[in-house]
Each structure stands twice: as C-alpha cells, then as structure tokens.
Image (cartoon, helix red, strand yellow):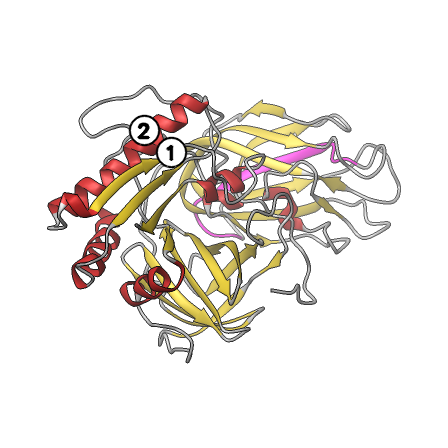
Amino acid sequence: MRIRNVTLFLILVALGSTSIQSQGQRKTAVAGPQPSLVSFSAGALIVVAPPEYGGSWSAMGVIDERPQSGWATPKGVVSPQVFVIELPERTVLKTLTFDTANTDGTNRGAKDVMVEMSSTDAKSGFQKIGQVVLKDKVNNQTFPVTAEVPGRWVRLTVQNNHGAPDYLELMDFRATGTQLTHTPVANISGTYDTDYNQFHVLQEGTSLTGCYEYKEGVLTGGIEGRVLKFTWIEGESKGPAIMVVSADGKKLVGLWWHENQSGAPAGVWNGEKLSDKVGSCPHWAGGAAQQLTKDLEEFGRARVYGINFDTDSAVIREESKQTLERIASVLKNKPDWKMTIEGHTDSTGSAAHNQTLSEQRARSVTDFLTAAGIPATRLKAAGFGSSKPVAGNETELGRAQNRRVELVRQ
C-alpha cells in the first residue's frame, strides 16, 4: 500500500485485553488499566470537530490513546473550541483523564475544560459531568466526574489555554466507567468507496472477508462490536488494519500498518457505503470458507480474527461459533489436511502466564473442532504466548492485533 493524500490521523486503537481461562476453570486475571470508553478503541468517533491545524494535529488525535499525538487549532485561534464524541453504547463515565505533556510549546495546552453528557443526540440534551483545570505539559491528569449521567454523546468544551497567543492544544482524552448496553452491530456487508478504491466486504457471523480494487487487495478478519480487525494482502505485501463502523453503518473510519510495523500507522483507510450489495473482484475467492481454503493452499497459514472469548475465560462466545463452524467445514472438505491451531497473546502479564493463556485458547478451538466432527488426530494445539507478535506491543492497538488464532497446515 502507499499513502494517499489524506490527513494522517495518528490513531492507535486499544481493544480491551482479554485474558483466557480453561473451560470450567477460573484463572486469575492479569491486572491492567481500565479501558477508555471514549476512545477509538471502544468504537467511539468524533462527530463534531473543532478547527484543526492539519497534518497530524487532528481532532482524532484526542481519542487515539497516544500522548505523542494530539489536536491543535490553526495559528491564532485560542477561543473556546468544542468536540462531540459519539460512543457506541449508552455509558456512564466515572473518571476523566487528560494528557498535555507533549504539546508543541509552553502555555499552549488546554487549561479549563468542561465535559458534558447527552442521551439525546450530538446537539442537545447535554448535562455537565465535569469542569476541570489542567496543568500545562502534564500527562495522566485524572478527575472524578461531578455527576454520573448516562448517555451516548460526550461534549468537550476547551475554554482556553495557559496564555499562549498562537495555538490551543490537547493531546489526549480518556475516560473510564460502565458501558450499559451491548448492541450487536448490524451486518456491514456491502460495497464502500474508500481511500483505496472500492472495498467489497462480506460479513458472515464474526468473520470478514473481501477484496478491494487496488493492487488486487484481499482481506480476511473479524468483527467485535463496532470494531473490524483484519489482515490486508497485496501480493507479497500484507499487514493489519483496524476500522470502526459508524452508528448508522454507513461509514468506516480506519487505519492500516505494514506487517510488524510499530508506532504510527502507515495510513488511514476511510470509506462510505455505496450499496448493500457486496460485489466482487476477479482476484477474490469469495466468502470466508473459500478465502480460508485459498490462503491455506497458497501460504500454508491463515490468521483468524473473529474468534472472540468471554473476558477472563476460554469459553468461546456464541457469536464466534459460525467462524469455527466454517473452519470445520473447510477441514471436512480437505480430509487429507492436518492442522496446527496456534494461540497468540499480547505481552500483558508474565511470559509464563501468556504461554498458559495461549495454550488454553488453542485448546478451546481444537475442542470445538473435534466436537464438530474433525478427528483429534488431525489437530494439534500450540501456544506461543507473546513470542511472535505481528505488531508492536508498546501500544494497545498492537496488543489487540497480537491476540489472535492462526491455522497452520502440518
């Protein structure tokens, strides 16, 4: 892929870390920070943005969970500015956190910030949940809310900076609390007009397959809530990508990386839905089972996203069973194939703990396939912990990409 002439939103997506336990046996979860519910990682999108300086200084930098990237006004604009963040679900926020350490100059950082919540829409019904005073050039400034108000729209009013006459800047905003609803996203299958030409995607349960009309690109991955996680392949080039679906299902906001790339993304990958008709490409096998078969025939290995587990559990979620049934179907159609099921984790926790988690995840998959009629003699479970990352573990997005299952032909 090459980067098109688009603004590079330095958004690193943080999908909540999922620890795994063997079925019927509790494991102690690895303690970690609570996930931010107002971030891109949670499926949140900015639906009202203030004026931006441009380039990497985008409003989206405020919800990317990277203190190194952020938002700045055009030069000379230091008047109050408003963001509205749409959350994927009805939510109650309890703590608010801001980063200002990496602002691009003394006294440019946001100072007085009002935070409000609405259950109505992005324009009305807001109630104040916090009024904070931020220090200049300090990260992790955390405040309790002054009122716990359920809602789906968060409004930030950045009222001023610390006295600089040229720019008003904010690097990151995060918030923790409780998500009150968990609504499955509607099927996103269709054709989208994107930064990389037309994008044809087919959703089958939690599985995603498709193609795009740029360098004979194909994709395979999975969906959880409003977050799409997949691998793009263009001949010998490939890498991970993340997209978030808008609430109306009409837009995709996303990023892509090269394989094993760390840090900022290589580019954005946004699109608008043209049709519910999936369409096709001459180079696409079509459908999850067909693409999985092709990948295993051609590469001997396939990365599978969309196998989702309960939090702190190796119990496979009901939503993921279609994906596993499709894997079983492929193996039934290829009775001479033997398969190693690899479990991979991120680097959270000790190496020993991660190794155990990866083995448990792999065994859960092999147990499902055996119960679906695949002889146990054709299957092998292997865990690799965090030893084979496909992305950097220094960011939440990288860790999310590293939590995966891979199928390998023996």
Q: Which residue is drawn at 24% across and 36% down?
A: 363
Q: In which quadrant of the rendered view does residue 297 lie?
A: bottom left
Q: What stretch is highlighted in magenta?
A: 109-122
Q: What x and y, as percent, mark residue 276?
A: 36, 73
Mark 1 — residue? 18
In this rendering, the answer to whether 196 lies above or below 352 is: below
Q: Determine the secondary structure under disc 2.
A: loop
Kindly tell me whether residue 317 is visible in this rendering.
Answer: no
Q: What x and y, as percent, mark residue 333?
A: 18, 63
Say which label, 2 or 1, has the lower sequence index. 1
* In magenta stretch: residue 110: yes
Q: What x and y, as percent, mark residue 175?
A: 53, 33
- The quadrant of the picture occupied by the N terminus is bottom right
Q: Which amino acid does label 2 sit on?
A: Asp
Pick the front one: 335 or 105:
335
Q: Residue at x 86, y 49 (%)?
A: 76
Q: Which residue is drawn at 19% across and 48% down?
A: 378
Q: Determine the secondary structure under disc 1.
A: loop
Pick the front one: 395 or 291:
291
Mark 2 — residue? 312
Q: Mark 2 touching mark 1, by CB under 8 A?
A: yes
Q: What x and y, as percent, mark residue 264?
A: 65, 47
